Structure formats: structure tokens, C-alpha cells
Amino acid sequence: MDTAMVIDLGRHALWTAVLVCAPLLGVALAVGLVIGIIQAATSINESTLSFIPKLIALALALLLFGSWQLVTLIDFTRSIFLRIPALFS
């Protein structure tokens, strides 16, 4: 196992983590921004008000993106298992 292989594996792991997290983080950011604008426009300064809409939006995002995220993680895991024989040669 050489340095290039380790760096490639780390790069692949970080890229997979970014791909899996991006849809949920994007939805949470968008919902938080919309709720923040509504709170600023109505002068409602309740910090717990944005929690329930974010929770609902994240649940819907998981329903929408969950299968794709799972497939992405399974493909990454398979690629790691396929690299195991090359580690010891």
C-alpha cells in the first residue's frame, strides 16, 4: 500500500461524505433561511420556531434522497472491499 493509494482512498471517502451530506445540509440551510427571513419580517424572535419546519423538511428530504444516499454508501463500501486484495500484494 503506497501513499498514492491512501490519498486516493481518503479523497474518495471525503467526496462520498460530501455527496451524501449535501442534500440534507442544503435543505436545512434553505428552510432555515426562509424561516429566518419570515422571523425578521414579523419581528418574532423565537429561537425554537425554526426547529419543527426544519425537522419536517429534513424528514421529507430523507424520504426523497435516502435511497440515493444508501446506494452511494453501498457503492463506496463495495469499492473499498474490492481494494482489499491489492493492499496485501
Image (cartoon, rainbow, N blue to C red):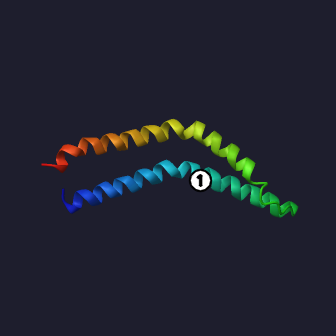
Specify the quadrant of the image occupied by residue 1: bottom left
The residue positioned 58% from the left and 49% from the top of the image is 24
The residue positioned 42% from the left and 42% from the top of the image is 72
Q: In the structure shown, which secondary structural element does the residue marked by tag 1 occupy?
A: helix
Query: Of 60 and 6, which appears nearest the observer?
Result: 6
Q: Tell me if mark 1 has few (under 14), some (14-19) or many (20+) residues whose alpha carbon lies within 10 angstroms of its own.
A: few
In the drawing, does residue 52 fall left or right of residue 81?
right
Specify the quadrant of the image occupied by residue 61: top right
Q: Position of residue 56 (x, y in %)?
A: 70, 43
Specify the quadrant of the image occupied by residue 62: top right
Q: Position of residue 41 (x, y in %)?
A: 84, 62
The residue positioned 76% from the left and 56% from the top of the image is 35
In the drawing, does residue 21 fall left or right of residue 50?
left
- The amino acid beneath tag 1 is Gly
Q: Farthest residue to the front: give it.
A: 88
Q: Position of residue 18 (x, y in %)?
A: 46, 54
In the drawing, does residue 8 fall left or right of residue 32?
left
The number of numbered badges drawn on the structure is 1
Query: Of 31 and 46, which appears nearest the observer?
Result: 46
The residue carrying mark 1 is 26
The residue positioned 59% from the left and 53% from the top of the image is 26
